[in-house]
Image: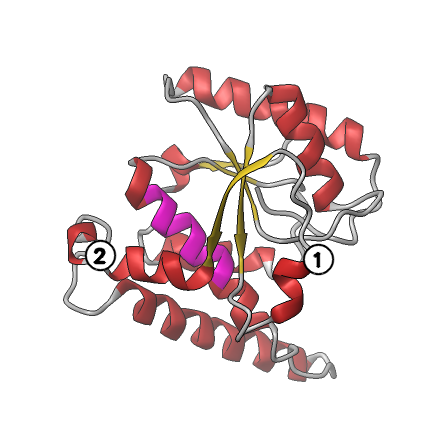
């Protein structure tokens, strides 16, 4: 799941809608594998993505897998993470190793390591966004955007390679242009994530 830590909406309402969206998508795609909900180290807050993911897991009756940055990248990320109902925990470097393993060749169809392709693509996307921000009279994106965008996209691609499928659920339909969530476009552009089969966008109806 991806979303904003500063989301001010009622997390219970949002979670119920996400669960409805997921169940409809899984039925349409005939997904039968038991799910596990992946979270990425957000500390628990009253509102925002950490509160929403807790409620989604509860409504679905599933456990959670926590992905955190390595301590040498951000020591606070793991320390502050919400571990409620977490049964598996992995670090970013482990997913990079999985993604670059030769047995994952079906994920990366070129000779270049998938993590290198993601890094280059995210750096390019940051440059594009910074150019746009300059034109708007805004400062560049903070340096930490790269590591969290990489965590987001490496997680999706690596876990899809491990399990054979992944569902990327957005917690909002209003994705800010300069948010970490907006870097989901990178995984789509590289073909690591399939928009039709892997994405569940947030909608407020099931029509």
Element under disc 1? loop
Q: Residues within 10 Å of mark 2 (few under 14, many from 20)?
A: many
Q: Is 19 rendered above or below residue 184? A: above
* Identity of the residue drawn at 60% across and 20% down: 61
Label of residue 80 in the image: 1
Q: Residues within 10 Å of mark 1 (few under 14, many from 20)?
A: few
Q: Is residue 177 visible?
A: no
Q: Is 60 rendered above or below residue 15? A: above
Report x, y in % for residue 6. 79, 53
Q: Report the front residue among 201 and 162.
A: 162
Report x, y in % for residue 11. 79, 35
In 3D space, how far apart are the residues under numbered discs 2 and 1 (Cα atoms)?
33 Å
Element under disc 2? loop
Main SS class of the magenta portion in the image = helix
- Nearer the viewer's eye, disc 2 or disc 1? 1
Q: Which span of residues is magenta-colored?
A: 151-160
Report x, y in % for residue 163. 32, 36
């Amino acid at each position: 799941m991806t979303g904003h830590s500063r989301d001010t909406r009622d997390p219970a309402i949002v979670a119920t809608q996400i669960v409805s969206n997921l169940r409809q998508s899984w039925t349409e795609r005939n997904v039968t594998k038991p799910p596990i909900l992946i979270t990425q180290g957000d500390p628990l807050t009253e509102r925002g993505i950490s509160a929403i993911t807790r409620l989604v897991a509860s409504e679905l009756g599933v456990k959670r897998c926590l992905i955190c940055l390595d301590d040498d990248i951000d020591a606070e990320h793991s320390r502050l993470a919400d571990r409620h109902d977490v049964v598996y925990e992995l670090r970013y470097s482990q997913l990079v190793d999985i993604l670059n393993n030769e047995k994952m060749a079906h994920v990366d169809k070129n000779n270049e390591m998938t993590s290198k392709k993601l890094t280059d693509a995210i750096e390019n996307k940051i440059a594009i966004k910074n150019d746009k921000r300059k034109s708007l009279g805004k400062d560049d994106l903070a340096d930490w955007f790269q590591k969290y965008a990489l965590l987001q996209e490496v997680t999706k691609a690596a876990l899809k390679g491990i399990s054979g499928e992944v569902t990327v659920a957005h917690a909002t339909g209003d994705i800010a242009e300069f948010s970490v969530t907006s870097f989901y476009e990178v995984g789509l552009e590289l073909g690591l994530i399939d928009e039709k089969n892997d994405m569940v966008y947030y909608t407020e109806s099931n029509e």
